[in-house]
Image: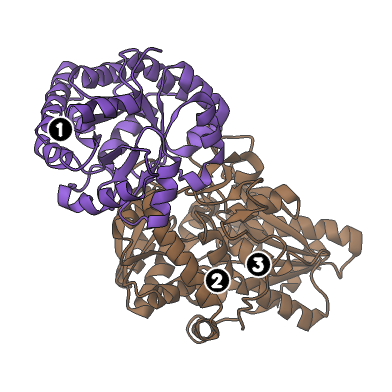
Chain colours: A brown, B purple
């Protein structure tokens, strides 16, 4: 693969991090003054690095030799037959550490090394970004501290163990709601005091400028590869692309390559939890309101006083009350459509993909599968069986087996289980 | 409102050859009425300027002490309107009363509306720990319209260019963070903060005479005395909050402890 750094889109931020210009106010940098110098330093280092062909070549080589890029684009034929249109899966689940997140952390850690810093910190919800950060730190020989909500350390003990094995320090965060947003707060507090030698490996395409754009640059390989793979195999672009959106790094990684392809519809699927008409969801764009969270103006789940509301999703990786500001911009301009997918729909898609394709997806990615099937059915009616939906299968589901055991009651007999899973006849 | 302005309070202290003492507590802790009692105790014990914290769910600049009180206040149901009510009750003492707030609650309330309601409650202005002047055109316009103080922060990591930009945008005073860190964790020393204070003074607009207040990391009378020689204002927050947290089951004892610390600090700034 080759990272294409000079390709910009019509939806990029300006040099102060505003998407759609300051008058629309998505993004920006709402941060303590103490961190501004570090964010400026990071911005400059990132611009320099992306303009340096040796940096880009080193990044590409690490992704290829260490992390297994490019990931394949796979035609899910049995799933396609169910919806009557072609479904292509970008297999980020096959990457080292099992998800798209390795791209971002290897990019940021390589940048850290270039900046001469010796320590990295990261926040993590379910632990996937923490594991990826610990992996990148081990690869580059950097000290690594991961902040994780205390509630999540108990829910995700296996990932805590993986981080420990990889040599990272894991700090359980007890403050606030003791989940992802509080882990971000605690990482920022660490960074205020350690910024001279520490880099913050932000886990998603959110936060203050330059993180939304920097993380996009390191994840956009997903879409750049997929676009080229699709053209090479089918000679046409897909009719639609689809991804799940929590903070939004896998989605922006896929979408970026297609933003200026007017004929390609762009769909983000948000965690609808127990339903967007209940308080238990994390569908930030669909149900949130404009506000400032973690340094950016974006859609936020908040109450009438601007206090952040605790989000819910069955998928810890999507359980975040904010969203990357570029997604807010893409939603506001109508370039992309964001729709909720409930816990139940995602779990059904998880079972379906497992049984039709032999791929157990992460529950995050199962949201994208469920949403993409809706889109594919509509497209099939309009365009017939050649209609193509390209879905980012952003991660694999090994980490989610605890949830799956509980949800499907996998301790029960085969007959009981198959009664629960609605599988349409495969033609 | 017949109270003193922030600038006057600093000027008075300067005329007395001492630093001003700025005391911080969050509104709504232990409850709204208890918070008002505590803030009035700070006024009575000699604080020259009062900062009222608006409790927020995601306070990235605050250490565990202030977080704990703010979270308890939120769990107790404190609303933005209660914070404004608290401002009104404290400003009525005549002591300049600012609100220290993270940005989202103000944006959510509506920036012009917040400025209008703060002014009519007798509030002196805002201290904005996560809003820098280059991201604040709406607040600056609203503050100017209502004659409110705009207190922005400078940090040891700030470039000269940013200190000049920040001090040019401030009214009331400029808040210098004594250490690179969050509230209530590390101790600031006069030697440690001197370079930032000197740079801030040198880079403030000529003739503005903008007072420099130092906060984050000040908790004892001796420290206040040590700092007071070098700065215009000594800002104390976590140490006051700690007194209230330590006496959560006995409010009168908490207020006594609060008064004792405020008196110690008030005498400290006079020793400096």
Q: Could you say which quadrant of the image residue A119 lies in?
A: bottom left
Q: Is residue B129 above or below residue A382?
A: above
Circles 2 and 1 on the same chain: no
* Direction from residue A10 to residue A406 in the image, left or right: left
Chain under disc 3: A
Residue at (49% x, 74% y) in the render = A107
Mark 1, residue position? B269
| Side (left or right) of A338 relative to A364 | right
Residue B21 x/y as whole percent = 22, 30
Secondary structure found at label 3: helix
The image quadrant where one finds the C terminus of chain A is: bottom right
Judging by the rendered image, the residue that carries numbered circle 2 is A218
- Residue position for label 3: A254
Q: Position of residue B3 (x, y in %)?
A: 35, 16
Is A81 placed left or right of B166 in the picture?
right
Q: Alpha-carbon neighbours of circle 2 within 10 Å: few (<14), some, or many (≥20)?
A: many
- Quick check: can you spot residue A231? yes
- The tag earlier along the polypeptide, 2 or 3, is 2
């Amino acid at each position: 693969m080759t990272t294409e750094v000079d390709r910009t889109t019509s939806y990029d931020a300006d040099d102060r991090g505003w998407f759609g210009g300051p008058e629309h106010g998505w993004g920006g940098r709402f941060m303590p003054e103490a961190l501004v110098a570090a964010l400026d330093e990071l911005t400059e280092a990132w611009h320099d690095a992306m303009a340096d062909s040796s940096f880009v070549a080193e990044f590409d080589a690490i992704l290829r030799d260490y992390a297994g890029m490019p990931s394949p684009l796979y035609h899910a034929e049995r799933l396609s037959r169910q919806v009557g249109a072609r479904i292509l899966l970008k297999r980020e689940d096959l990457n080292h550490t099992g998800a798209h997140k390795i791209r971002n952390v290897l990019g940021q850690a390589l940048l850290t090394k270039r900046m001469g810093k010796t320590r990295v910190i990261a926040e993590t919800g379910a632990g996937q970004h923490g594991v990826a950060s610990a992996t990148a730190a081990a690869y580059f020989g950097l000290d690594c501290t991961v902040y994780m909500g205390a509630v999540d350390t108990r829910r995700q003990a296996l990932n805590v163990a993986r981080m420990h094995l990889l040599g990272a320090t894991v700090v359980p965060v007890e403050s606030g709601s003791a989940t992802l947003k509080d882990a971000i707060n605690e990482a920022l507090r660490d960074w205020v005091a350690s910024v001279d030698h520490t880099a913050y490996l932000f886990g998603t395409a959110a936060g203050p400028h330059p993180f939304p754009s920097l993380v996009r640059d390191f994840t956009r390989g997903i879409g750049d590869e997929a676009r080229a793979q699709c053209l090479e195999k089918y000679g046409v672009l897909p009719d639609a692309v689809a991804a799940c959106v929590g903070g939004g790094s896998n989605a922006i990684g896929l979408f970026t390559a297609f933003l200026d392809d007017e004929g390609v519809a762009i769909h983000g699927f948000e965690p609808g939890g127990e339903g967007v008409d209940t308080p238990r969801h994390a569908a930030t764009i669909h149900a949130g309101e404009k506000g400032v969270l973690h340094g950016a103006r974006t859609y936020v789940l908040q109450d009438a006083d601007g206090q952040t509301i605790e989000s819910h999703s069955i998928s810890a990786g999507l359980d975040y009350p904010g969203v990357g500001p570029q997604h807010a911009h893409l939603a506001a301009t109508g370039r992309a459509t964001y729709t909720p997918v409930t816990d139940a729909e995602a779990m059904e898609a998880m079972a379906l993909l497992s049984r039709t394709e032999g791929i157990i997806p992460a529950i995050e990615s199962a949201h994208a599968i469920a949403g993409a099937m809706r889109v594919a059915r509509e497209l099939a009616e309009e365009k017939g069986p050649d209609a193509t939906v390209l879905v980012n299968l952003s991660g694999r589901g090994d980490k989610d087996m605890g949830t799956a055991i509980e949800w499907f009651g996998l301790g029960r007999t085969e007959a009981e289980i198959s009664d629960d899973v609605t599988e349409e006849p495969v033609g | 409102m017949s109270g003193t302005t922030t600038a006057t309070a600093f000027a008075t202290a300067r005329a007395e050859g001492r630093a001003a003492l700025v005391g911080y507590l969050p509104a709504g802790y232990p409850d709204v009425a208890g918070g008002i009692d505590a803030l009035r105790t700070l006024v009575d014990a000699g604080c020259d300027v009062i900062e009222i914290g608006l409790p927020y769910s995601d306070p990235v600049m605050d250490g565990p002490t202030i977080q704990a009180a703010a979270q308890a206040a939120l769990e107790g149901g404190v609303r933005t309107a209660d914070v404004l009510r608290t401002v009104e009750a404290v400003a009525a003492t005549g002591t300049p009363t600012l609100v220290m707030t993270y940005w989202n609650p103000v944006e959510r309330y509506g920036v012009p509306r917040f400025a209008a309601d703060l002014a009519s409650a007798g509030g002196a202005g805002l201290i904005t720990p996560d809003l820098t002047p280059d991201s604040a055109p709406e607040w600056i316009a609203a503050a100017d319209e209502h004659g409110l103080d705009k207190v922005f922060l400078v940090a040891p990591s700030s470039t000269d260019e940013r200190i000049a930009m920040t001090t040019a945008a401030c009214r009331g005073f400029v808040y210098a963070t004594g250490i690179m860190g969050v509230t209530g964790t590390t101790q600031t020393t006069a030697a440690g903060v001197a370079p930032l204070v000197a740079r801030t003074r040198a880079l403030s607009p000529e003739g503005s005479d903008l007072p420099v207040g130092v906060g984050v990391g000040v908790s004892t009378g001796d420290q206040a005395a040590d700092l007071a020689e070098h700065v215009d204002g000594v800002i104390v927050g976590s140490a006051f909050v700690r007194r209230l947290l330590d006496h959560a089951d006995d409010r009168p004892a908490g207020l006594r402890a609060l008064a004792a610390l405020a008196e110690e600090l008030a005498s400290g700034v006079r020793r400096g």
